[in-house]
Image: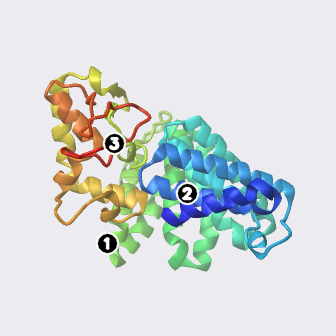
């Protein structure tokens, strides 16, 4: 993060006098800033950085290749980078529960990747498959199953060709989109025989991969088997909406790092200060039982080490969890107190625009 912030600052100063040369460099630096902010669980900062990255990327594309210094020429943008930035923004917007905006951004990314893949399929089809697969996931979670099916089938057609040419690299991707296609076909009330075929193929691929690398593919195999069982149990009486899971970014990444709301299993959000203390105590016990799994889930979802989450040598999973803002707030509510103290350890009033994450009891602030 530190060198990325430094790079953003340098490019920002350069664009003040020579925007045509350096705005594309600023766009790429802001893109990286958005990614690292997300990995540090600073979601609002990540969204802001990514949105600015796209703003400057669009300007750079409109202006054309920069002339001048070697530094300026080193940061030439093309539409593939814009598609990547849009894909990143959609992910962050989805994590922020701004779901329609996320879909709109990802639809533009898919349309851009589709144009590029028509011209340079070898380089761009893997990108198109990845973006189309993600859009199918988002549409499915919004119950827009017919649109999801179209995207999943498009991605499956691409990954089938890629896996045939390079199975080591692309078979798992193909298994994933086959599972998506089966789920979307089921949700849309489509051809059940085709849904069963796709689900069976997905399970067969994952079973073979899991036999070779259980740690890497066991979770994916479990999910594929769940989809297979759901498809097999479906009758011909109409559409059945497949079950969807919370993902780390939709739930725990956001929830643990804030002290205002709780999101229950029905996806309902409750203000902590309006929750009864007994309910807060139940939620607290529910979360603490999952402490080990939560660290693994967050590390995988954010693609970081447990140490990057703040886990120290002195910690076990529960002691780490008990420092997270949501858990601190729930513990206060379970005792009948307000979720957020009015005065921080440092002696200053707690305000929405003031960050106290580095404060601790006994801190001296002059």
Q: Nearer the viewer, residue 355 or 31?
A: 355
Mark 3, other Cα within 10 Å: few <14 / some 14–19 / many ≥20: some
Which mark is first along the chain, 2 or 1? 2
Quadrant of the rendered image containing residue 77: bottom right
Q: Earlier in the sequence, mark 3 or mark 2?
A: 2
Closer to us: 153 or 262: 262
| Residue 133 position in % (x across, y down) | 57, 55
Q: Quadrant of residue 336?
A: top left
- Calculate the distance from the C-alpha at mark 3 to the C-alpha at mark 2: 22 Å
The label number, if any, that marks residue 33 in the structure image? 2
Residue found 19% across the figure and 38% down from its top: 284
Judged by depth in the image, the label closer to the viewer, 3 or 2, is: 3
Q: Residues within 10 Å of mark 2 (few under 14, many from 20)?
A: many
The vertical placement of 279 against 322, above or below, is: above
Residue drawn at point x = 32 percent, y = 30 percent:
349
**Image: 117 above or below 340:** below
Look at the image and name its color scheme. Answer: rainbow
Q: Secondary structure at mark 1?
A: helix
Q: Quadrant for residue 188, please give it.
A: top right
Label 3 vs label 1, nearer the camera: 3
Q: CA distance from mark 1 to mark 2?
A: 34 Å
Lateral position of residue 137 relative to residue 337, left or right: right
Callout 1: few (<14), some (14-19), or many (20+) C-alpha neighbours within 10 Å?
some
Residue displayed at 19% across by 27% down: 279
Q: Earlier in the sequence, mark 3 or mark 1?
A: 1
Closer to the camera, 139 or 323?
323
Label 2: state its secondary structure: helix
Report x, y in % for residue 250. Answer: 42, 43
Q: Which residue is mark 1?
A: 214
Q: For the residue labelled by badge 3, is the local secondary structure a helix, a strand or a loop?
A: loop
Q: Is residue 184 visible?
A: no
């Amino acid at each position: 993060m530190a060198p990325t912030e430094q790079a953003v600052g340098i490019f920002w100063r350069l664009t003040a006098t020579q925007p045509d040369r350096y705005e594309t460099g600023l766009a790429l630096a802001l893109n990286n800033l958005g990614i690292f902010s997300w990995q540090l669980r600073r979601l609002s900062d990540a969204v802001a950085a990514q949105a600015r990255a796209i703003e400057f990327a669009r300007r750079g594309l409109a202006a054309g290749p920069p002339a001048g210094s070697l530094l300026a020429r080193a940061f030439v943008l093309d539409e593939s980078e814009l598609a990547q930035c849009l894909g990143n923004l959609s992910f962050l917007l989805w994590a922020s529960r701004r779901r329609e905006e996320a879909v709109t951004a990802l639809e533009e990314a898919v349309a851009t990747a589709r144009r590029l893949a028509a011209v340079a399929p070898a380089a761009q089809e893997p990108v198109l498959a990845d973006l189309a697969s993600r859009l199918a996931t988002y549409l499915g979670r919004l119950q827009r199953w017919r649109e999801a099916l179209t995207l999943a089938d498009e991605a499956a057609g691409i990954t089938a060709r890629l896996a045939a040419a390079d199975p080591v690299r692309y078979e798992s991707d193909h298994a994933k989109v086959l599972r998506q296609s089966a789920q979307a076909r089921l949700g849309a009330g489509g051809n059940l025989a085709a849904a069963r075929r796709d689900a069976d193929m997905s399970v067969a691929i994952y079973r073979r991969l899991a036999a070779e690398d259980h740690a890497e593919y066991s979770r994916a195999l479990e999910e594929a088997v769940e989809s297979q069982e759901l498809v097999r149990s479906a009758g011909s009486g109409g559409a059945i909406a497949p079950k969807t899971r919370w993902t780390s970014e939709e739930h725990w990444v956001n929830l643990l790092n804030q002290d205002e709301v709780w999101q229950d299993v029905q996806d309902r959000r409750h203000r902590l200060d309006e929750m009864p203390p007994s309910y807060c105590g139940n939620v607290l016990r529910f979360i603490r039982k999952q402490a080990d799994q939560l660290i693994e889930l967050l590390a995988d979802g954010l693609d970081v080490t447990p140490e990057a989450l703040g886990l120290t040598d002195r910690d076990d999973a529960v002691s780490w969890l008990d420092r997270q803002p949501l858990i601190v707030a729930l513990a206060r509510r379970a005792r009948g107190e307000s979720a957020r103290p009015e005065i921080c350890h440092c002696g200053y009033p707690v305000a929405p625009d003031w960050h106290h994450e580095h404060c601790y009891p006994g801190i001296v602030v002059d």
